[in-house]
Image: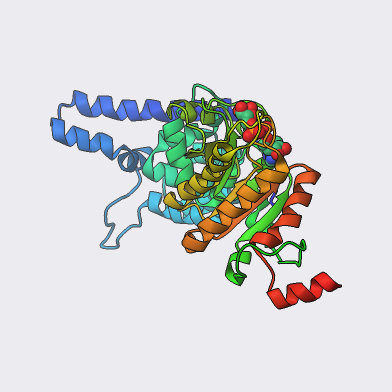
Amino acid sequence: MVVCCCYNSTVVISDMALQISARVSHVRTLLCTAGSLSGGVRGDFLQKAGVKLKHFLTRGSPQQQVGGTPVKSPVRGYMSAATRADRLSASTATAALRRFSQANGSPSLPRGGTGWLGKFALGAALGVGTAALVRSLHTGIITAMSVKSNLDSAEGNWKETKDFLLSLPVEDRRRYYRTSGSVSLDDLPVWTPTAGRSEPIRYQRNEKLDLKISVFSGDITKLEIDAIVNAANKTLLGGGGVDGAIHRAAGPLLKKECASLHGCETGEAKITCGYGLPAKYVIHTVGPIAQGGVGETERNALRSCYRNSLQAAADNAARSVAFPCISTGIYGYPPEQAVHEALAAVREFLDVHHDKLDRVIFCVFLPTDKELYLQNLPLYFPADPAEAAIKSKL
Ligand code: AR6
């Protein structure tokens, strides 16, 4: 079980971003006023603003050789010190940075909340990861500083936030979860084949595939995996059931990205970032409405949902995927029929593309669905026939 912290520091972080933004503007104005930049050079400057900015922020710090000895760039030094300190608490990390800077004789080390180190320390104290802050100083300071406030606001920039979150390793992304009590892949046991029902098995035994299957009983929004599947509607703009739960947990930027996708047809799948979710991606698929009964059209559409979602995961290098029981809630597909389409589609996809996925998780929310999956899994991911024959006689 991984427990993470929620946050409530958006205003201060926005303020930090604004102050830093003001400094960038100041540098730009100075350089343009001096008329020292041709158009091309200026464009180059703006592109590399992050790199230039870190030197500006440490004004007065020695960058050249002193007495023939190369002096380590204070910023690079802070970066490695901060990265080393990443696993420490905010105050310890700040102290490590301060010690490093004193040892390197930098004259511009603020004790209060001013100066770049002051802002860095404030960010660390607010729970913004040290490594993430350092990385943001290096690559794109405004984006990194505004990401937390973006996640909570419908006014936030979804593209910027998505790029930032997808660039992070999971340890760094945890700081941005909007939910607590996430469940990691290591906490999910893999399927152990049992004798199951007395019906003839439908697929051959394949031990390697068993290791790729899990059943998780609970809320899909807690899963810290590569992708969770959403049982959405054609608009992709949110709704009730699992769709509502996913949108609430991810935050308002999910709807903004969904709006850019212009809907989704029944049986198809489209992928977005997971934003404040522990899952990196959300794959949105639209199940068939089966309130009028189930025929060939509905069966094919439901299988397509699973197949196309798995394909979307594979196309985006998402190696772990969790499915809710698509269409079996508001859309009225009988769960005891849907389970067979789900299991057959996953088994057939894994038979062909086993190298593309590490784990497929059937997320069952209702105890009755859990029972259905445990009963039917042996038909699609069977035990050894001889072993099964013995067990079934016991
Ligand atoms: N985690 C995992 N599974 C859940 C969760 C959860 N947090 N919440 C519900 N389920 P439904 P549908 C299960 O109705 O039938 C929406 O309004 C639930 O127990 O969410 O495909 C969409 O916008 C059931 O087993 O999806 C569409 O308009 C399963 O998720 C429509 O509902 C699917 O139930 C889609 O209907």
Quarter holding ligand 1 = top right
Indicate left or right for 226 with 245 as reference: left
For the residue pair 237 and 342, the one nearer the viewer reads as 342
Query: In the image, what residue occupies the spot 53% across and 31% down?
Result: 254
Using the image, determine if residue 235 lies above or below residue 126.
Answer: above
Please, which residue is most extreme toward the right here? 394
The C terminus is located in which quarter?
A: bottom right
- Residue at the image point whose x is 79% and y is 76% from the top: 390
The answer to whether any part of residue 361 appears in the image is yes
Q: How is the image coloured?
A: rainbow
- Indicate the position of residue 362 as horizontal and vertical percent values: 66, 50
Work out whether residue 86 or residue 201 is closer to the camera in this orientation and state it: 201
Image coordinates for residue 257, horizontal then vertical, percent: 47, 30
Where on the picture, by quarter, is residue 299?
Answer: top right
Q: Is residue 203 above or below residue 309?
A: below
Q: Position of residue 360 (x, y in %)?
A: 59, 55
Measuring 20% from the left and 23% from the top, which residue is drawn there? 33
